Amino acid sequence: MGSLLDLNFVADNFIYVILLAIGVILLKMIIIGITALILRYPARTIFLTVFSIFQVGEFSLLLSTVGLDNGLLPTNIYQYFLAISIITMALTPFLMNYAPNIAYFLLKIPIPKNIRKRLHSYHNLQLQAHSNIEELKDHLVIIGYGINGKNISKAAKSASIPHVIVDLEQEAFQEAKKK
């Protein structure tokens, strides 16, 4: 992928490439953040998600290459796209590495009480919607409802061990909730 990038093009258009990369990163972060907020994830999860999947991915590169090959995408636009993709993919591991620290810092920023209350109410609604579990003590927590999670759940149920199942996948959650 890097060999496709024309470094002379990047050098000649360095300011535009950087500004476009920043714009793409910010736009994707805003879209991801709003989506996670609408889905009522807690603020920490929103921040971690935003810093983890903001990059332009490989599939987009494939589509742009096909567009270039078929004359749908001009060469200069392709070079901008390629440069932005490489920059965002190169930044991803660094931002992912520091995402927990950045999220912790952002969560410590004082925000108006009504906004903080709204964020907490979204999180509480999410917990209430997915949980009608009474307060448990000395119970088993099963993380993931895959093959092993199902087997452990069956064993716990047959042994009368109180347990709760935690899974982020909606289908697995619904299946566990039915059972």
Image (cartoon, rainbow, N blue to C red):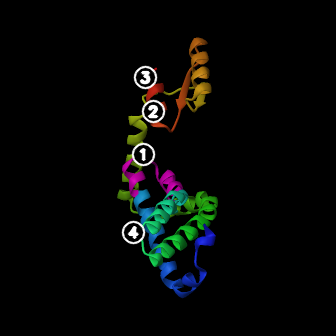
140 magenta-colored: no
Specify the quadrant that holds the N terminus: bottom right
Amino acid type of the residue that numbered disc 4 sits on in the rendered structure: Leu
- Span shown in magenta: 34-50
Query: Disc 4 marks which residue?
Result: 72
Three-letter residue code for mark 1: His
Q: Closer to the camera, 150 or 157?
A: 150
x, y percent for residue 143: 59, 33
Image coordinates for residue 158, horizontal then vertical, percent? 58, 12
Along the viewing direction, whichever of 92 and 44 lies nearer the viewer: 92
Disc with the residue nearer the chain's start (4 vs 3) = 4
* The magenta stretch spans residue 37: yes
Question: Which residue position is annotated with label 1?
Answer: 123
Nearest to N terminus: mark 1 or mark 4: 4
Location of residue 87 (image quadrant) = bottom right
Please state which amino acid type lies under the numbered disc 3.
Answer: Lys
